[in-house]
């Protein structure tokens, strides 16, 4: 019998990631991460080649949403690490547990060698939850700590910089470690909770505002049960859409970036006599959501994963706890009260919100979103890029389950929809996936069409083609500025898709779109890109 291969520090990293549930890593290799890539593959973690580190990071996020295992991004020294900066910032703002493994030159080498060398940890320090430099003996502990930090509240990115010689170092006696997550914590019994229960018992116009922490704490079922028991209508942030299925009578829709939606939902919140903030993280919200209620005059009870240091809003009573347990504790001993809002204002707001974004049968971005929703099944995972189309879609798209709509809503970065969709589809191949993107957003990461083709992933991309940075063009016009730097060419994206080996369709009306979508939904061997032509300024008055 031959001796087993000696264990390298990189193997310990990879094994620990495997034990944490990771089966996929995404990235672009360079000479400095070859041992890491080898170790990942040997450990049973498939390395998927993307065409840009930013996209690879979003693929890792897409996979995390479907599997629950932290995302892994691999980037090589220098340019590889620098290319990852945007998706690391996104992981921090969007609360994504992302482990970035970067290769680096050994410290002694870097004393006299400068090519591609800069301080990776200094680059990532302000945008990551933590940064480490791997050591050989501490490989397991560093990886374990990175996992614990990345997945702990609120989740975020952790960088492990791996010197080349450390990755290869043979490890004789690893320092063993095992992170075991602590049990979720509920709010303590006491005066504050008793007061909150009294407020709930007497509330006639309650509203729940549900956000990212509810998603992170898996509180969807609790939210629905609580809402039904106490008749509490639910507004969610964009990322929390689907925590309550959006065809539920108590679902008032999503809020975040749309002035049109704010005009309907903020007045309702102003009239509420009890506002329950359930894992509401205002990192997703626009300025209109700064101090949107008055905790001196309104009763506001907050359950959040971490203490409020953002000061975007304040609550009358705040509990730092597992948000599902918080809601459970609040309802304990309080008599059910399913009928609230006697004047019907909450239901009316829900209807107004629904009608405000509907297409009315006219061709344009709303009609396109409605057609996809009609033709694709409810279990479809949708992803959406940044821009005017996203604001419209996030209001209009009915999300039936948590993580049914993926996007960048903290950082709001362009170029995320396609790679998020790729990651989700690789991790959950049986599920239909549709990526919605603006034309500029697609151009930012066009190279990933090649990744899609290479992986033969049958997902559908819907591109809103208007040859314009519509969201920015609107803002420019609102400030009475002439158009500058917002227009570009109307490209033939269907032809581009075909060049990459996918099916490309250009559509200009509802019938053409329906036919293209129906064919796309049944396709199993390759991707479909539908270039939906819309007018410039098609979003005016619609978001
Ligand atoms: C990486 C990045 N750069 C710039 C922006 C600013 N930005 C937000 S939306 C937008 C326009 C996007 O255009 P497009 O993809 O065509 O979508 P549309 O607004 O037309 O729906 C820009 C430039 C951003 N959010 N992210």
Image (cartoon, helix red, strand yellow):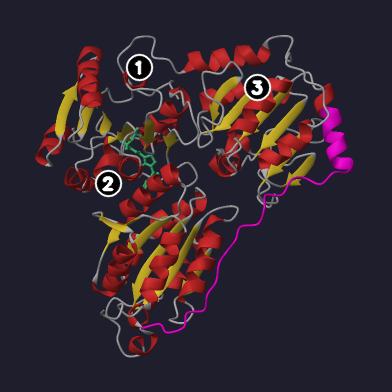
Other-residue count near label 3 (Cα within 10 Å), few / some / many at <14 / 14–19 / ≥20: many
- Mark 1 or mark 2, which has the lower sequence index? 1
For marks 2 and 3, give the one nearer the viewer: 3
User: Circles 2 and 3: CB distance less than 8 Å?
Assistant: no
Q: Secondary structure at mark 3?
A: loop
Q: CA distance from mark 2 to mark 3?
A: 39 Å
Q: Secondary structure at mark 1?
A: helix
Residue under the image location 57 percent in, 31 percent down: 236
- Mark 1 or mark 3, which has the lower sequence index? 3
Other-residue count near label 2 (Cα within 10 Å), few / some / many at <14 / 14–19 / ≥20: few
Q: Is residue 371 magenta?
A: no
Spot occupied by residue 25 in the image (x, y as percentages of width and height): 34, 57
User: Circles 1 and 3: CB distance less than 8 Å?
Assistant: no
Query: Mark 3 near ligand 1 (CB under 8 Å)?
Result: no
Spot occupied by residue 287 in the image (x, y as percentages of width and height): 58, 38
In the figure, 466 relative to 453: above or below?
above
Query: Mark 2 near ligand 1 (CB under 8 Å)?
Result: yes
Residue under the image location 44 percent in, 22 percent down: 396
Spot occupied by residue 338 in the image (x, y as percentages of width and height): 73, 16
Ligand 1, seen in the image, is in the quarter at top left
Residue 120 appears left or right of 56 = right
In the figure, 511 relative to 41: above or below?
above
Quadrant that contains the C terminus: top left
The residue pinned by badge 3 equals 233
Nearest the eye: 422 or 533: 422
User: Is residue 127 at least partly visible in the picture?
Assistant: yes
The residue pinned by badge 1 equals 374
Give, as a single range, the part of the protein colored magenta.
170-199
The residue pinned by badge 2 equals 444
Q: CA distance from mark 1 to mark 3?
A: 25 Å
């Amino acid at each position: 019998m031959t001796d087993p291969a000696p264990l390298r520090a990189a193997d310990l990293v990879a094994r620990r990631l495997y034990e944490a549930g990771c089966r996929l890593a995404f990235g672009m290799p360079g000479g400095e991460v070859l041992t890491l890539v080898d170790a990942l593959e040997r450990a049973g973690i498939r390395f998927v080649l993307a065409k840009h580190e930013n996209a690879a990071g979003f693929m890792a996020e897409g996979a995390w949403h479907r599997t629950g295992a932290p995302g892994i991004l691999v980037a090589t020294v220098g340019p590889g690490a620098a290319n990852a900066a945007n998706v690391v910032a996104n992981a921090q703002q969007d609360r994504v547990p992302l482990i970035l493994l970067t290769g680096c030159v050994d410290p002694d080498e870097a004393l006299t060698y400068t090519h591609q060398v800069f301080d990776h940890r200094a680059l990532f320090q302000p945008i990551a939850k933590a940064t480490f430099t791997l050591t050989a003996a501490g490989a397991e502990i560093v990886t374990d700590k990175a996992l614990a930090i990345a997945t702990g509240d609120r989740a975020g990115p952790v960088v492990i910089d791996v010197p080349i010689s450390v990755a290869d170092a043979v490890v004789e006696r690893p320092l063993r470690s095992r992170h075991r997550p602590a049990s979720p914590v509920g709010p303590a019994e006491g005066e504050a909770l008793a007061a909150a229960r009294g407020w709930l018992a007497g509330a006639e116009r309650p509203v729940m505002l549900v956000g990212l922490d509810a998603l992170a704490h898996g509180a969807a079922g609790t939210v629905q049960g609580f809402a039904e028991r106490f008749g509490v209508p639910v507004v969610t942030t964009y990322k929390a859409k689907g925590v309550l299925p959006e065809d539920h009578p108590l679902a008032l829709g999503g809020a975040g970036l749309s002035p049109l939606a704010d005009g309907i939902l903020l007045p309702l919140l102003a009239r509420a006599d009890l506002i329950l903030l359930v894992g509401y993280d205002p990192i997703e919200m626009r300025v209109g959501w700064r101090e949107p209620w008055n905790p001196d005059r309104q009763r506001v009870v907050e359950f959040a994963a971490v203490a409020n240091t953002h000061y975007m809003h304040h609550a009358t009573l705040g509990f730092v706890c597992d948000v599902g347990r918080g809601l459970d504790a609040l309802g304990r001993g309080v008599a059910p009260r399913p009928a609230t809002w006697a004047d019907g204002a909450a239901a009316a707001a829900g209807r107004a919100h629904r009608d405000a974004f509907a297409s009315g049968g006219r061709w344009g971005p709303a009609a396109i979103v409605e057609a996809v929703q009609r033709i694709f099944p409810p279990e479809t995972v949708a992803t959406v890029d940044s821009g005017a189309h996203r604001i419209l879609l996030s209001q209009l798209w009915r999300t039936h389950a948590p993580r049914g709509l993926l996007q960048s809503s903290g950082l709001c970065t362009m170029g995320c929809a396609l790679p998020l969709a790729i990651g989700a589809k690789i991790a959950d191949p049986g599920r239909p996936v549709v990526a919605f993107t603006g034309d500029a957003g697609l151009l930012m990461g066009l190279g990933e069409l090649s990744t899609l083709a290479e992986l033969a992933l049958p997902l559908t991309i819907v591109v809103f083609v208007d040859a314009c940075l519509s969201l920015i063009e609107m803002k420019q016009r609102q400030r009475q500025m002439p158009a500058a730097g917002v227009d570009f060419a109307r490209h033939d994206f269907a032809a581009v898709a075909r060049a990459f080996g996918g099916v490309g369709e250009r559509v200009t009306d509802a019938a053409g779109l329906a036919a293209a979508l129906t064919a796309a939904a049944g396709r199993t061997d390759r991707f479909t890109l539908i270039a939906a032509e819309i007018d410039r300024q098609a979003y005016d008055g619609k978001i």
